[in-house]
Amino acid sequence: MIIFKPNWITHSDRAKGVKPCIYSIHVHPDGKRIATGGLDATVKIWSTESLFNESEENNPDTHQLLCTMQRHSGAVLCVRWSNEDGRYLASSSDNDNVIIVWELDRDATSETVFGSTVVNHEPWRPVKYLRAHESDVQDLAWSKDNQYLASCGVDGVVVVWNGTDFNQVQKIDQHAGFVKGVAWDPVGKYLACQSDDKMLKIWRTSDWGLEQEIKAPFINAPGTTLFRRLSWSPNGSHIVTSNAVNGVHCIAAIISREDWGTDVSLVGHQLPIEVACFNPKLFYFPNEEDGNTNNGNDSQDTGESLATVCALAGQDRGVSLWVTKYCRPVCVATDIFEGNIYDLAW
């Protein structure tokens, strides 16, 4: 595993010596852009060309920062690209309690960001301002088919928006605490929400009614996490949740879709987990008994089986990678950040 920390992906103001926290990160579906949101109330879009090609990192003709957007008046807590084509970027913040949906302005030319010398080489413009929350908007999630955009916040409310015209579809106000994480079932039947009421709630998309409440892994969970970002596996069979506890251990709880059981835990982090994130793809892994290596063929012919991969991170400043067929992490990276890790993206 190679760990690379590009020092040019930052929200810092080098002239003032300020280094604002980055709360959210997301990779565009085409892999060519990364969006970040930070304490400085800006959304930034970065080119990944310098990440993939080391020679481009110091090339003055390669634009690393593509765009800086300054329409929020508070810290940007979440940024999420729409699926498949990445046409839209949704961002949310505290203070202004608004969600902004951005779209690339293909008719615009490069422009200088107001009050600075920064140039937007790829201008993005706001196409919608979504207002329904009364406090900080903590997390966002697009459904797999982009039919819906879900948002949640400190007001204890989950709002579902139409992914085409961005009208409000449903407001769910049945949580008893700050809602800090939302995730869509890739099959399209459910929406999972995790909140400070120490509960995970599963909502049906057919009537927006409550399908299940899950309490056991969260009863003794600390209330210190800024986020409780959870993730649904790409095949829809499991949910991996953040900020769960098993005895005295901080864990990520795995929720089975079959019976909403909580028998499996990912144990290893020393402090509460802020974010859990499944890789959106399924992988072939060799079965241990035959020792075959992955050659991309059908699993029945090669002794391989399909598995999912997820990442965890949180307040211990470490990142762990897990394959669902193994009981231990395949990789652990510690002390690679100076503070809490708030978001992950594949």
Image (cartoon, rainbow, N blue to C red):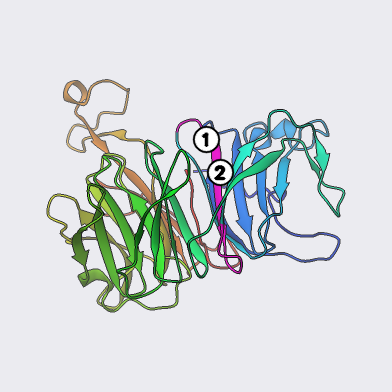
* Residue 157 rendering spot, x and y as whole percentages: 39, 66
What residue did someone put label 1 on? 86
Q: Amino acid at mark 2?
A: Leu
Of residues 86 and 63, the one nearer the viewer is 86
Asked whether, in this view, residue 11 is left or right of residue 294, the answer is right
Quote the CA–CA distance across marks 2 and 1. Answer: 7 Å
The circle on residue 89 is: 2
Reply above or below: 125 against 24.
above
For residue 92, above or below residue 30: below
Report x, y in % for residue 100. Answer: 58, 51
In terms of image quadrants, where is residue 272?
bottom left
Q: Secondary structure at mark 2?
A: strand
Q: Quadrant of residue 98?
A: bottom right
Question: Does the magenta-highlighted stretch encompass residue 261?
Answer: no
Magenta residue check for 87: yes
The structure residue drawn at horizontal position 45% and vertical position 48%, both measured from the top left corner, is 167
Q: Is residue 86 left or right of residue 121?
A: left
Residue 92, given in percent of the width and then of the height, sits at 55, 57
Q: Are marks 2 and 1 in contact (CB under 8 Å)?
A: yes
- Examine the rendering and report whether any part of residue 326 can be seen: no
What residue is at 21 percent from the left and 23 percent from the top? 302
Main secondary structure along the magenta-highlighted residues:
loop
Q: Which residues are magenta?
A: 84-98
Helix, strand or loop under label 1: loop
In which quadrant of the rendered view does residue 119 lie?
A: top right
Residue 79, horizontal then vertical, whole percent: 55, 51
Q: Residue at x 68, y 29 (%)?
A: 106
Looking at the picture, which amino acid does disc 1 mark? Gly
